[in-house]
Image: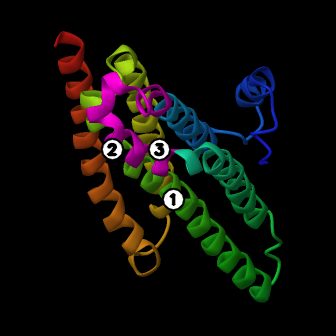
Amino acid sequence: MSQYGNMTLDQYRDALASDAPTPGGGTAAAVALSQGAALAVMVCNLTEGNEKWKNGWGDAHACRIVATPLLELGHQLASDDAEAFDGVMSAYKLPKNTEEEVGIRRLAIQNSTLDAARVPMSTANNAYELLELLPPLARNGNANAVTDVGVAGLLVSAACKGALFNVEININSLSDEIGGNLRSQLEKLRRSCRDASREVMRSVHDRMQS
């Protein structure tokens, strides 16, 4: 189990609140992904096998397949994000007394910054994959748990959007040659996440009023 998966809620809260550089927003986004996935799995459990919600079994099954691995992966990404940021900080502390050391330091900063962008991009991509599956679950799953789908949507949306903040701030310091691919992915995913988030909320509100 990952570092943050082993913490109690109180320990995790206090770690976030401390003045230590990590954990930070990237870690919080990944943990939010795990929590949103857990709520989604709960709704799947309340839907599948219940004859009253048989029309939603297929949607629940599809959501479960994606959400279940994220229970642990979210915590792993939380640890990976903190480690990646620590790597950037370590790179900046490398000596720069000679030309050779300056070159080594520059390369280390570049590589660690790229890694610090790739990890939250993974968080964002996984979050979006789950987010797309929540509207059908809201429409066809157990109606008594539709608000749980809504909260799951908020958490997963926050995970995606929050992770993209970390992608952006890291690739801003990279050249187009190095960070250009991530930059193009970022803009596309941000728009897709916005649209999917709105669809989740629409689906939840429609179901509540039906």
* In magenta stretch: residue 144: no
Q: Which of 136 and 192 is in front in this view?
A: 136
The percent coordinates of residue 55 (x first, y second) are 26, 34
Question: Which residue corresponds to the image point at 51% horizontal and 35% vertical from the top-left?
Answer: 41
- Dot 3 or dot 2, earlier in sequence: 2
Per the rendering, the mark at residue 58 is 2
The percent coordinates of residue 154 (x first, y second) are 40, 28
- Is the Cβ of the residue at disc 3 closer than 8 Å to that at disc 1? no
Q: What secondary structure characterizes most of the magenta part? A: helix
Per the rendering, the mark at residue 187 is none
The magenta segment is 43-67
Per the rendering, the mark at residue 122 is 1
| Amino acid on which disc 2 is placed | Gly
Label 1 to label 2: alpha-carbon separation: 26 Å
| Amino acid on which disc 1 is placed | Ser
73 sits to left or right of 141: right
Q: Is residue 169 above or below residue 9?
A: below
Q: Residue at label 3? A: 64
The percent coordinates of residue 206 (x first, y second) are 17, 19
Label 3 to label 1: alpha-carbon separation: 19 Å
- Is the Cβ of the residue at disc 1 closer than 8 Å to that at disc 2? no
- Dot 3 or dot 1, earlier in sequence: 3
The percent coordinates of residue 6 (x first, y second) are 81, 38
- Name the image colouring: rainbow
Furthest residue in direction front, as rendered? 51
Question: Which residue corresponds to the image point at 61% horizontal and 38% vertical from the top-left?
Answer: 31
149 sits to left or right of 104: left
Question: Which residue corresponds to the image point at 26% horizontal and 50% vertical from the top-left?
Answer: 192
Q: Which of 45 and 30 is in front in this view?
A: 45
- State which quadrant residue 197 falls in: top left
Of badges 3 and 1, nearer the viewer stands 3
Furthest residue in direction bottom, as rendered? 100
